[in-house]
């Protein structure tokens, strides 16, 4: 019975691979800010795989994301390699809601042109919540990434977490299955 059910589920599955990119509207949530933190616009670009089983899909991604904030007039830029693993639920047609964990790995950190990578933790964990629409080979997503882990590496630093709203467009390069 399990073999038959597994075979039936796989027969209805589709796999697509694609590229995506878009804008980030990023800021930092700081517990006791002594400075003014304002949002900054960045970008993200990367690849995704979508494993869809009728109304549910699992979508891992590999994304380079420029985040950070404007801190009292000085540009704080954080570059991450992010790996979100999303569960997508398709409501009607290509309309979907999505949620899942995101694991980020710091690749660069500068403030006002000065390298500050040694002051920022090397990894970040977030929860991703969003909605999207798939139409033919095109994908449109709006997502909010809420930072769960503190990113400051100094023990005396205020609790600082990433907050990023993303708007993305993507294109499915390959599609296999139904």
Image (spheres, rainbow, N blue to C red):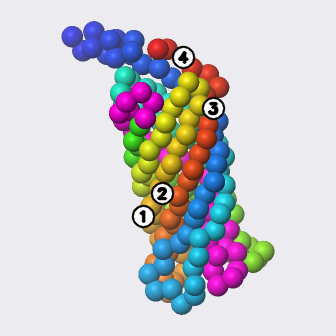
Q: Secondary structure beneath disc 4? A: strand
Which residue is the site of mark 1?
Answer: 148
**Alpha-carbon span between mark 3 and mark 2:** 22 Å
- Name the mark nearer the viewer: 2 or 1: 2
Q: Report if the CB atoms under discs 3 and 1 are less than 8 Å apart.
A: no
Q: Which mark is residue 176?
A: 4
**Is residue 176 toward the left or the right of residue 10 in the image?**
right
Q: Which mark is residue 171?
A: 3
Name the residue furthest bottom: 34
Q: Which mark is residue 145?
A: 2
Image quarter (top left, top right, bottom left or bottom right) of the N terminus: top left
User: Is the stretch drawn in magenta largely helix, strand or loop?
Assistant: strand
**Alpha-carbon span between mark 2 and mark 4:** 29 Å
Q: Residue at x 59, y 76 (%)?
A: 38
Q: Percent x, y for residue 137?
A: 59, 26
Q: Secondary structure beneath disc 1? A: loop
**Alpha-carbon span between mark 4 and mark 1:** 35 Å
- Name the mark nearer the viewer: 4 or 1: 4
- The range drawn in magenta is 66-95
Q: Residue at x 59, y 31 (%)?
A: 138
Q: Residue at x 55, y 40 (%)?
A: 140
Sequence-earlier tag: 2 or 4: 2
């Amino acid at each position: 019975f399990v073999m038959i059910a597994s075979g039936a589920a796989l027969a209805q599955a589709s796999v697509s691979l694609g590229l995506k990119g878009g804008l980030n509207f990023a800021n930092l949530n700081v517990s006791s800010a002594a400075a003014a933190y304002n949002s900054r616009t960045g970008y993200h670009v990367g690849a995704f795989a979508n494993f869809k089983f009728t109304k549910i899909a699992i979508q891992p991604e590999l994304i380079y994301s420029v985040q950070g904030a404007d801190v009292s007039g000085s540009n704080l830029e954080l570059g991450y390699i992010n790996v979100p693993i999303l569960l997508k639920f398709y409501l009607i047609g290509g309309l979907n809601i999505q949620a899942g964990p995101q694991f980020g790995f710091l690749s660069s950190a500068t403030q006002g042109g000065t390298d500050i990578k040694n002051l920022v933790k090397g990894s970040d964990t977030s929860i991703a919540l969003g909605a999207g629409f798939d139409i033919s080979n095109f994908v449109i997503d709006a997502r909010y990434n809420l930072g769960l882990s503190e990113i400051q590496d100094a023990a005396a630093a205020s609790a600082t977490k990433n907050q990023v709203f993303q708007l993305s467009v993507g294109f499915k390069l390959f599609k296999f299955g139904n």
